[in-house]
Amino acid sequence: MNFELSEEYQDLVDTVREFADEVVAPVSAKHDEEHSFPYAVVDQMADMGLFGLPFPEEFGGMGGDYFALCLALEQLARVDQSVAITLEAGVSLGAMPVYRFGTEEQKREWLPLLASGKALGGFGLTESEAGSDASGTKTTAKLVDGEWVINGTKEFITNSGTDITRLVTVTAVTDTITREDGSVKKEISTILVPSDTPGFKAEKAYNKVGWNASDTHPLTLTDVRVPEANLLGTRGRGYANFLQILDEGRIAIAALATGAAQGCVEESIKYAKERQAFGTNIGSFQSIQFKIARMQARAHTARLAYYDAASRMLAGKPFKTQASIAKLVAGEAAMDNARDATQIFGGYGFINEFTVSRHYRDSKILEVGEGTTEVQLMLIARELGL
Protein backbone atom coordinates (compact mmCIF):
# COMPACT_ATOMS: atom_id res chain seq x y z
CA MET A 1 0.00 0.00 0.00
CA ASN A 2 1.45 3.33 -1.10
CA PHE A 3 0.36 6.62 0.45
CA GLU A 4 2.73 8.69 -1.68
CA LEU A 5 0.94 11.32 -3.75
CA SER A 6 1.28 11.18 -7.52
CA GLU A 7 3.17 13.99 -9.23
CA GLU A 8 -0.11 15.55 -10.36
CA TYR A 9 -1.59 15.52 -6.86
CA GLN A 10 1.65 16.83 -5.33
CA ASP A 11 1.78 19.70 -7.83
CA LEU A 12 -1.76 20.64 -6.77
CA VAL A 13 -0.79 20.52 -3.10
CA ASP A 14 2.26 22.70 -3.68
CA THR A 15 0.30 25.23 -5.73
CA VAL A 16 -2.55 25.57 -3.25
CA ARG A 17 -0.16 25.66 -0.29
CA GLU A 18 1.75 28.55 -1.86
CA PHE A 19 -1.51 30.36 -2.61
CA ALA A 20 -2.72 29.82 0.96
CA ASP A 21 0.50 31.16 2.48
CA GLU A 22 1.00 34.13 0.14
CA VAL A 23 -2.56 35.22 -0.66
CA VAL A 24 -5.00 33.86 1.91
CA ALA A 25 -3.04 34.09 5.15
CA PRO A 26 -2.11 37.80 4.94
CA VAL A 27 -5.77 38.91 4.86
CA SER A 28 -7.31 36.25 7.12
CA ALA A 29 -7.18 38.26 10.34
CA LYS A 30 -8.76 41.28 8.64
CA HIS A 31 -11.72 39.34 7.24
CA ASP A 32 -12.17 37.49 10.53
CA GLU A 33 -12.26 40.72 12.52
CA GLU A 34 -14.60 42.45 10.07
CA HIS A 35 -16.79 39.37 9.50
CA SER A 36 -16.37 40.14 5.81
CA PHE A 37 -16.58 37.71 2.92
CA PRO A 38 -13.21 37.44 1.09
CA TYR A 39 -14.44 38.15 -2.44
CA ALA A 40 -10.98 38.86 -3.86
CA VAL A 41 -9.59 35.60 -2.49
CA VAL A 42 -12.56 33.60 -3.77
CA ASP A 43 -12.18 35.23 -7.17
CA GLN A 44 -8.54 34.12 -7.35
CA MET A 45 -9.54 30.61 -6.26
CA ALA A 46 -12.05 30.61 -9.10
CA ASP A 47 -9.34 31.64 -11.57
CA MET A 48 -7.23 28.72 -10.32
CA GLY A 49 -10.07 26.32 -11.11
CA LEU A 50 -10.49 25.12 -7.53
CA PHE A 51 -14.29 25.17 -7.66
CA GLY A 52 -14.22 22.93 -10.72
CA LEU A 53 -11.68 20.41 -9.46
CA PRO A 54 -13.90 17.28 -9.29
CA PHE A 55 -16.09 17.97 -12.33
CA PRO A 56 -15.63 16.85 -15.95
CA GLU A 57 -14.35 19.36 -18.47
CA GLU A 58 -17.59 19.04 -20.47
CA PHE A 59 -19.36 20.81 -17.59
CA GLY A 60 -16.71 23.46 -17.14
CA GLY A 61 -14.68 21.54 -14.57
CA MET A 62 -10.99 20.70 -14.31
CA GLY A 63 -11.43 16.98 -14.95
CA GLY A 64 -10.03 16.02 -11.55
CA ASP A 65 -11.63 14.04 -8.75
CA TYR A 66 -12.93 14.37 -5.21
CA PHE A 67 -9.55 13.57 -3.68
CA ALA A 68 -8.04 16.55 -5.50
CA LEU A 69 -10.67 18.75 -3.86
CA CYS A 70 -9.78 17.29 -0.46
CA LEU A 71 -6.08 17.99 -0.94
CA ALA A 72 -6.85 21.62 -1.79
CA LEU A 73 -9.11 21.96 1.24
CA GLU A 74 -6.41 20.66 3.57
CA GLN A 75 -3.92 23.25 2.40
CA LEU A 76 -6.36 26.15 2.62
CA ALA A 77 -7.62 25.17 6.06
CA ARG A 78 -4.09 25.33 7.52
CA VAL A 79 -4.34 29.12 7.39
CA ASP A 80 -8.05 29.95 7.09
CA GLN A 81 -10.97 27.63 7.72
CA SER A 82 -13.49 30.22 6.48
CA VAL A 83 -11.96 30.21 3.01
CA ALA A 84 -11.75 26.41 3.04
CA ILE A 85 -15.40 25.93 4.01
CA THR A 86 -16.45 28.39 1.31
CA LEU A 87 -14.81 26.10 -1.25
CA GLU A 88 -16.03 22.90 0.40
CA ALA A 89 -19.65 24.01 0.62
CA GLY A 90 -19.59 25.58 -2.83
CA VAL A 91 -18.49 22.30 -4.38
CA SER A 92 -19.82 19.45 -2.24
CA LEU A 93 -23.10 21.07 -1.17
CA GLY A 94 -23.67 23.62 -3.91
CA ALA A 95 -22.60 21.99 -7.16
CA MET A 96 -22.24 18.28 -6.36
CA PRO A 97 -25.99 17.59 -5.89
CA VAL A 98 -26.60 18.96 -9.40
CA TYR A 99 -23.80 16.78 -10.78
CA ARG A 100 -24.94 13.63 -8.95
CA PHE A 101 -28.71 13.90 -9.42
CA GLY A 102 -29.43 16.57 -12.00
CA THR A 103 -30.90 16.04 -15.44
CA GLU A 104 -28.69 16.70 -18.43
CA GLU A 105 -30.44 20.04 -18.89
CA GLN A 106 -29.90 21.01 -15.23
CA LYS A 107 -26.23 20.10 -15.46
CA ARG A 108 -25.77 22.15 -18.62
CA GLU A 109 -27.49 25.13 -17.05
CA TRP A 110 -25.88 25.18 -13.62
CA LEU A 111 -22.60 23.24 -13.48
CA PRO A 112 -20.46 25.47 -15.74
CA LEU A 113 -21.49 28.48 -13.67
CA LEU A 114 -20.87 26.83 -10.29
CA ALA A 115 -17.67 25.07 -11.41
CA SER A 116 -16.28 28.41 -12.57
CA GLY A 117 -16.41 29.73 -9.01
CA LYS A 118 -17.86 32.99 -10.30
CA ALA A 119 -21.18 31.93 -8.74
CA LEU A 120 -21.90 30.01 -5.54
CA GLY A 121 -24.55 27.49 -4.62
CA GLY A 122 -25.80 26.29 -1.25
CA PHE A 123 -27.83 23.43 0.15
CA GLY A 124 -30.84 24.26 2.30
CA LEU A 125 -31.48 21.28 4.56
CA THR A 126 -31.28 22.34 8.19
CA GLU A 127 -34.28 23.82 9.98
CA SER A 128 -34.88 24.80 13.58
CA GLU A 129 -36.33 21.34 14.28
CA ALA A 130 -34.57 19.40 11.55
CA GLY A 131 -30.81 19.11 11.99
CA SER A 132 -29.46 15.68 12.82
CA ASP A 133 -33.04 14.49 12.32
CA ALA A 134 -33.49 15.80 8.80
CA SER A 135 -36.77 13.88 8.50
CA GLY A 136 -38.23 16.61 10.73
CA THR A 137 -38.35 18.93 7.71
CA LYS A 138 -41.35 21.27 7.77
CA THR A 139 -40.70 23.30 4.62
CA THR A 140 -43.33 22.38 2.04
CA ALA A 141 -43.45 22.40 -1.76
CA LYS A 142 -46.80 21.99 -3.49
CA LEU A 143 -47.22 21.47 -7.20
CA VAL A 144 -49.60 24.12 -8.55
CA ASP A 145 -50.17 24.67 -12.28
CA GLY A 146 -46.78 23.27 -13.25
CA GLU A 147 -44.84 25.13 -10.56
CA TRP A 148 -43.51 24.24 -7.14
CA VAL A 149 -44.79 26.67 -4.51
CA ILE A 150 -42.36 26.55 -1.60
CA ASN A 151 -42.91 27.84 1.93
CA GLY A 152 -40.69 27.43 4.96
CA THR A 153 -37.47 28.45 6.69
CA LYS A 154 -33.93 27.11 6.72
CA GLU A 155 -31.11 27.62 9.21
CA PHE A 156 -27.30 27.76 9.04
CA ILE A 157 -27.04 27.74 5.24
CA THR A 158 -23.51 28.36 3.94
CA ASN A 159 -22.91 30.49 0.83
CA SER A 160 -26.58 31.51 0.78
CA GLY A 161 -26.35 35.30 0.91
CA THR A 162 -23.22 36.47 -0.92
CA ASP A 163 -23.23 38.82 -3.88
CA ILE A 164 -22.33 35.85 -6.09
CA THR A 165 -24.84 33.34 -4.68
CA ARG A 166 -27.00 32.10 -7.55
CA LEU A 167 -28.60 28.88 -6.36
CA VAL A 168 -29.79 27.10 -3.23
CA THR A 169 -31.09 23.55 -3.38
CA VAL A 170 -33.77 23.10 -0.73
CA THR A 171 -35.32 20.03 0.81
CA ALA A 172 -39.08 20.21 1.16
CA VAL A 173 -42.02 17.97 1.97
CA THR A 174 -43.79 17.35 -1.33
CA ASP A 175 -46.39 14.88 -0.02
CA THR A 176 -47.42 12.91 3.07
CA ILE A 177 -48.25 9.23 3.12
CA THR A 178 -50.46 7.68 5.79
CA ARG A 179 -49.38 4.18 6.74
CA GLU A 180 -51.72 1.34 7.75
CA ASP A 181 -50.97 1.95 11.42
CA GLY A 182 -52.07 5.59 11.07
CA SER A 183 -48.58 7.10 11.22
CA VAL A 184 -47.59 9.64 8.61
CA LYS A 185 -44.49 9.44 6.43
CA LYS A 186 -43.16 12.55 4.76
CA GLU A 187 -42.15 12.50 1.10
CA ILE A 188 -39.08 14.73 1.00
CA SER A 189 -37.75 16.03 -2.31
CA THR A 190 -35.01 18.45 -3.37
CA ILE A 191 -35.75 21.47 -5.54
CA LEU A 192 -33.43 23.96 -7.24
CA VAL A 193 -34.21 27.53 -6.24
CA PRO A 194 -32.37 30.39 -7.98
CA SER A 195 -31.55 33.00 -5.36
CA ASP A 196 -33.21 35.81 -7.32
CA THR A 197 -36.59 34.05 -7.21
CA PRO A 198 -39.31 36.29 -5.65
CA GLY A 199 -40.05 35.20 -2.10
CA PHE A 200 -36.54 33.83 -1.49
CA LYS A 201 -34.82 35.86 1.23
CA ALA A 202 -31.48 35.46 2.95
CA GLU A 203 -32.02 36.94 6.40
CA LYS A 204 -29.39 38.80 8.42
CA ALA A 205 -26.12 36.88 8.66
CA TYR A 206 -25.38 35.08 11.91
CA ASN A 207 -22.94 36.54 14.43
CA LYS A 208 -20.86 33.39 14.84
CA VAL A 209 -18.15 32.28 17.24
CA GLY A 210 -15.93 31.23 14.35
CA TRP A 211 -15.78 30.91 10.56
CA ASN A 212 -16.41 34.65 10.60
CA ALA A 213 -15.39 35.17 6.96
CA SER A 214 -17.73 32.41 5.81
CA ASP A 215 -21.21 33.41 4.62
CA THR A 216 -24.00 31.84 6.71
CA HIS A 217 -27.66 32.89 6.81
CA PRO A 218 -31.11 31.73 7.81
CA LEU A 219 -33.43 31.61 4.80
CA THR A 220 -37.09 32.45 4.45
CA LEU A 221 -39.09 31.06 1.54
CA THR A 222 -42.49 32.70 1.09
CA ASP A 223 -44.62 31.44 -1.80
CA VAL A 224 -41.46 30.84 -3.81
CA ARG A 225 -42.48 29.60 -7.26
CA VAL A 226 -40.13 27.65 -9.52
CA PRO A 227 -40.86 25.44 -12.54
CA GLU A 228 -41.76 21.78 -11.98
CA ALA A 229 -38.60 20.94 -13.94
CA ASN A 230 -36.52 22.33 -11.02
CA LEU A 231 -37.10 19.08 -9.11
CA LEU A 232 -33.62 17.66 -8.49
CA GLY A 233 -33.51 13.90 -8.79
CA THR A 234 -36.46 11.57 -8.28
CA ARG A 235 -39.41 12.92 -6.34
CA GLY A 236 -39.39 11.54 -2.80
CA ARG A 237 -35.68 10.70 -2.90
CA GLY A 238 -34.51 14.06 -1.58
CA TYR A 239 -33.61 12.85 1.90
CA ALA A 240 -31.84 9.73 0.63
CA ASN A 241 -29.92 11.73 -1.96
CA PHE A 242 -28.88 14.25 0.66
CA LEU A 243 -27.49 11.46 2.85
CA GLN A 244 -25.31 10.37 -0.06
CA ILE A 245 -24.07 13.93 -0.49
CA LEU A 246 -23.31 14.06 3.24
CA ASP A 247 -21.29 10.83 3.07
CA GLU A 248 -19.06 12.39 0.42
CA GLY A 249 -18.99 15.72 2.19
CA ARG A 250 -17.71 14.15 5.38
CA ILE A 251 -14.52 13.18 3.59
CA ALA A 252 -14.08 16.77 2.46
CA ILE A 253 -14.78 18.10 5.96
CA ALA A 254 -12.26 15.59 7.34
CA ALA A 255 -9.67 16.96 4.92
CA LEU A 256 -10.48 20.50 6.04
CA ALA A 257 -10.19 19.47 9.70
CA THR A 258 -6.87 17.75 8.97
CA GLY A 259 -5.59 21.00 7.51
CA ALA A 260 -6.69 22.87 10.62
CA ALA A 261 -4.91 20.34 12.83
CA GLN A 262 -1.75 20.57 10.72
CA GLY A 263 -1.88 24.35 10.74
CA CYS A 264 -1.82 24.31 14.52
CA VAL A 265 1.25 22.06 14.43
CA GLU A 266 3.11 24.36 12.04
CA GLU A 267 2.27 27.51 13.98
CA SER A 268 3.29 25.86 17.26
CA ILE A 269 6.64 24.69 15.89
CA LYS A 270 7.42 28.17 14.58
CA TYR A 271 6.45 29.80 17.88
CA ALA A 272 8.31 27.23 20.01
CA LYS A 273 11.54 27.97 18.13
CA GLU A 274 11.15 31.74 18.54
CA ARG A 275 9.67 32.21 22.03
CA GLN A 276 12.27 32.63 24.76
CA ALA A 277 11.72 31.67 28.39
CA PHE A 278 14.20 30.95 31.17
CA GLY A 279 17.09 31.75 28.84
CA THR A 280 16.18 29.40 25.99
CA ASN A 281 13.50 28.81 23.38
CA ILE A 282 10.48 26.95 24.73
CA GLY A 283 10.86 24.28 22.03
CA SER A 284 13.73 22.88 24.07
CA PHE A 285 11.35 22.00 26.92
CA GLN A 286 10.24 18.40 26.83
CA SER A 287 6.70 19.31 27.89
CA ILE A 288 6.33 21.46 24.76
CA GLN A 289 8.02 18.87 22.55
CA PHE A 290 5.66 16.14 23.73
CA LYS A 291 2.62 18.33 23.24
CA ILE A 292 3.60 19.16 19.65
CA ALA A 293 4.50 15.54 18.97
CA ARG A 294 1.00 14.46 20.01
CA MET A 295 -0.45 17.19 17.80
CA GLN A 296 1.49 15.88 14.81
CA ALA A 297 0.34 12.32 15.54
CA ARG A 298 -3.29 13.48 15.51
CA ALA A 299 -2.89 15.32 12.20
CA HIS A 300 -1.12 12.34 10.62
CA THR A 301 -3.81 9.93 11.78
CA ALA A 302 -6.56 12.21 10.50
CA ARG A 303 -4.87 12.44 7.12
CA LEU A 304 -4.59 8.68 6.79
CA ALA A 305 -8.28 8.36 7.70
CA TYR A 306 -9.52 10.71 4.99
CA TYR A 307 -7.06 9.30 2.42
CA ASP A 308 -8.53 5.85 3.10
CA ALA A 309 -12.14 7.03 2.81
CA ALA A 310 -11.39 8.96 -0.39
CA SER A 311 -9.58 6.02 -2.00
CA ARG A 312 -12.54 3.76 -1.29
CA MET A 313 -14.95 6.30 -2.72
CA LEU A 314 -12.95 6.73 -5.92
CA ALA A 315 -12.63 2.94 -6.30
CA GLY A 316 -16.40 2.56 -6.13
CA LYS A 317 -16.23 0.65 -2.84
CA PRO A 318 -18.46 1.21 0.21
CA PHE A 319 -17.06 4.15 2.16
CA LYS A 320 -19.86 5.37 4.44
CA THR A 321 -18.29 4.07 7.65
CA GLN A 322 -14.79 5.17 6.67
CA ALA A 323 -16.13 8.66 5.94
CA SER A 324 -17.69 8.81 9.40
CA ILE A 325 -14.47 7.61 11.00
CA ALA A 326 -12.46 10.21 9.09
CA LYS A 327 -14.84 13.00 10.04
CA LEU A 328 -14.85 11.92 13.70
CA VAL A 329 -11.07 11.54 13.98
CA ALA A 330 -10.20 14.68 12.04
CA GLY A 331 -12.77 16.89 13.77
CA GLU A 332 -11.49 15.88 17.19
CA ALA A 333 -7.87 16.28 16.05
CA ALA A 334 -8.57 19.84 14.91
CA MET A 335 -10.23 20.77 18.21
CA ASP A 336 -7.60 19.06 20.37
CA ASN A 337 -4.72 20.59 18.41
CA ALA A 338 -6.29 24.04 18.58
CA ARG A 339 -6.57 23.74 22.35
CA ASP A 340 -2.96 22.58 22.72
CA ALA A 341 -1.65 25.24 20.34
CA THR A 342 -3.44 27.94 22.29
CA GLN A 343 -1.81 26.63 25.47
CA ILE A 344 1.64 26.71 23.86
CA PHE A 345 1.11 30.31 22.74
CA GLY A 346 -0.01 31.31 26.24
CA GLY A 347 -1.52 34.79 26.36
CA TYR A 348 -0.86 35.34 22.66
CA GLY A 349 -3.05 32.33 21.90
CA PHE A 350 -5.97 34.32 23.30
CA ILE A 351 -5.42 37.22 20.90
CA ASN A 352 -7.61 37.04 17.81
CA GLU A 353 -4.99 38.21 15.34
CA PHE A 354 -3.04 34.97 15.82
CA THR A 355 -3.90 32.01 13.60
CA VAL A 356 -4.14 29.56 16.50
CA SER A 357 -6.78 31.66 18.22
CA ARG A 358 -8.89 31.57 15.08
CA HIS A 359 -8.41 27.81 14.87
CA TYR A 360 -9.55 27.57 18.50
CA ARG A 361 -12.80 29.37 17.67
CA ASP A 362 -13.23 27.84 14.22
CA SER A 363 -12.58 24.19 15.00
CA LYS A 364 -15.51 23.55 17.33
CA ILE A 365 -17.96 23.57 14.42
CA LEU A 366 -16.01 20.67 12.90
CA GLU A 367 -17.50 18.51 15.67
CA VAL A 368 -21.00 19.75 14.81
CA GLY A 369 -21.48 20.65 11.16
CA GLU A 370 -22.29 18.10 8.42
CA GLY A 371 -23.03 15.46 11.03
CA THR A 372 -22.20 15.83 14.72
CA THR A 373 -19.64 13.69 16.52
CA GLU A 374 -22.53 11.82 18.10
CA VAL A 375 -24.06 11.06 14.69
CA GLN A 376 -20.73 9.70 13.46
CA LEU A 377 -20.47 7.46 16.51
CA MET A 378 -24.02 6.28 15.92
CA LEU A 379 -23.28 5.44 12.28
CA ILE A 380 -20.08 3.60 13.14
CA ALA A 381 -21.80 1.62 15.90
CA ARG A 382 -24.65 0.75 13.54
CA GLU A 383 -22.14 -0.64 11.04
CA LEU A 384 -20.74 -2.82 13.84
CA GLY A 385 -24.17 -4.34 14.31
CA LEU A 386 -24.95 -2.54 17.56
Image (tube, grey):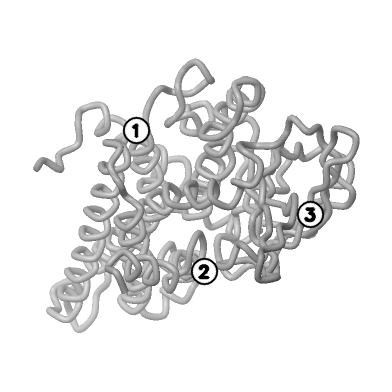
Q: Earlier in the sequence, mark 2 or mark 3?
A: 3
Nearest the eye: 344 or 196: 196
Kindly identify which residue carries mark 3.
140
Q: In the image, what residue type sits under mark 1?
A: Thr
- For marks 3 and 1, give the CA distance: 44 Å
Residue drawn where x is 41% and y is 74% of the image: 349
**Residue 105 x/y as whole percent:** 65, 21
Q: Is residue 281 above or below residue 323?
A: below
Dividing the image into 4 quarters, which one contains the N terminus?
Answer: top left
Residue drawn where x is 71% and y is 57% of the image: 177
Assign a secondary structure to mark 3.
strand
Kindly identify which residue carries mark 1.
15
Asked if marks 2 and 1 touch (Cβ < 8 Å), the reply is: no
Residue drawn where x is 67% and y is 47% of the image: 189
Residue drawn where x is 31% and y is 49% of the image: 319
Q: In the image, what residue type sits under mark 3?
A: Thr
Q: Is residue 188 left or right of residue 268?
A: right
Name the mark on residue 198.
Answer: none
Assign a secondary structure to mark 1.
helix
Kindly identify which residue carries mark 2.
352
Nearest the eye: 292 or 333: 333
Q: Is residue 322 above or below residue 199?
A: below
Q: Is residue 188 left or right of residue 149?
A: left
Asked if marks 3 and 1 touch (Cβ < 8 Å), the reply is: no
- Of all residues, the one furthest to the top in this rendering is 58
